[in-house]
């Protein structure tokens, strides 16, 4: 049985980005992420645009796309879309990864994503402070919504995705993400 070489946060932050690749640190293990394909990026951008409109109108905080979050001393994730509450935005240094978990993390599933990796990400977001995580499945037109309280729901195209405790009043037809 081989051993894994684990990186420290300092080692990870010294890595030089490679063209077309993003890196995440998963409990010390380096993960390479591929750039999104058109379907993935369209869905990501639709969600980000609609959330940003709602968040900006209510001055609730800020929506980020593919931004690094230091979830812990050995985990750095780059969710597809995130929401950070206004009270935390003022403390963000725009030149370094954001410390802590976003209030909402959204992952848009790509064909290469493994179920166990997605489950791990959801757990990492929720255990480090996210209030909710949405995992969006473009090919099957579903959103799996998880809350820190332990509640989870599967929303199909005919359902509405709501902001639940993160932003009450937000509602989005799930099917509109995929059209």
Image (cartoon, rainbow, N blue to C red):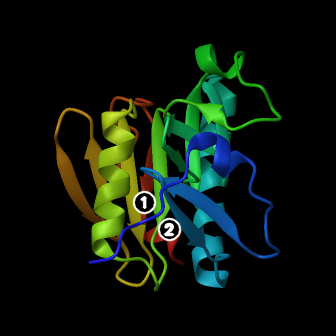
Q: Position of residue 26 (x, y in %)?
A: 45, 55
At mark 1, the secondary structure is strand
Q: Nearer the viewer, residue 110 or 95?
A: 95
Specify whether residue 86 is in view.
Answer: yes
Q: Quadrant of the N terminus?
A: bottom left
Toward the viewer: 147 or 100?
A: 100
Tell me whether the residue at label 1 lies in contact with that at label 2, contact meaning CB atoms closer than 8 angstroms: yes
Residue visible at 65% across and 51% down?
Answer: 12
Whether residue 43 sits left or right of residue 71 in the image: it is right
Q: Residues within 10 Å of mark 2 (few under 14, many from 20)?
A: some
- x and y, in percent, of residue 31 in the image: 53, 66
Picture quadrant where residue 160 is located:
bottom left
* Secondary element at tag 2: helix
Q: Quadrant of residue 175?
A: bottom left
Q: Which residue is mark 1?
A: 173
- Is any part of residue 143 visible from this angle? no
Q: Nearer the viewer, residue 51 or 69?
A: 69
Q: Where is the C terminus found, in terms of image quarters?
A: bottom right
Left or right position of 161 against 36: left
Residue 81 coordinates in the image, percent (x, y):
58, 52
Q: Is residue 87 above or below residue 84?
A: above
In the rendered view, tell whether residue 24 sits above or below residue 87.
below
Q: Which residue is mark 2?
A: 176
Q: CA distance from mark 1 to mark 2?
A: 6 Å
Q: Position of residue 54 (x, y in %)?
A: 60, 37
């Amino acid at each position: 049985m081989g051993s894994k070489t684990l990186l420290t946060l300092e080692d990870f932050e010294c890595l030089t980005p490679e063209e077309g690749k993003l890196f995440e640190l998963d409990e010390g293990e380096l993960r390479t992420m591929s750039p999104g394909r058109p379907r993935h990026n369209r869905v990501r951008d639709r969600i980000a645009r609609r959330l940003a409109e709602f968040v900006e109108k209510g001055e609730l905080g800020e929506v980020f796309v593919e931004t690094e979050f230091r979830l812990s001393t050995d985990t750095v994730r780059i969710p597809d879309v995130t929401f950070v509450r206004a009270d935390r935005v003022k403390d963000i240094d725009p030149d370094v990864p954001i410390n802590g978990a976003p209030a909402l993390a959204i992952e848009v599933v790509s064909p290469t994503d493994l179920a166990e990796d997605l489950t791990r990400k959801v757990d990492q977001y929720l255990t480090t402070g996210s209030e909710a995580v949405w995992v969006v499945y473009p090919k099957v037109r579903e959103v799996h919504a998880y809350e820190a309280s332990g509640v989870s729901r599967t929303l199909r195209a005919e359902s509405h995705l709501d902001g639940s405790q993160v932003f009450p009043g937000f509602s989005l037809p799930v099917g509109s993400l995929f059209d």
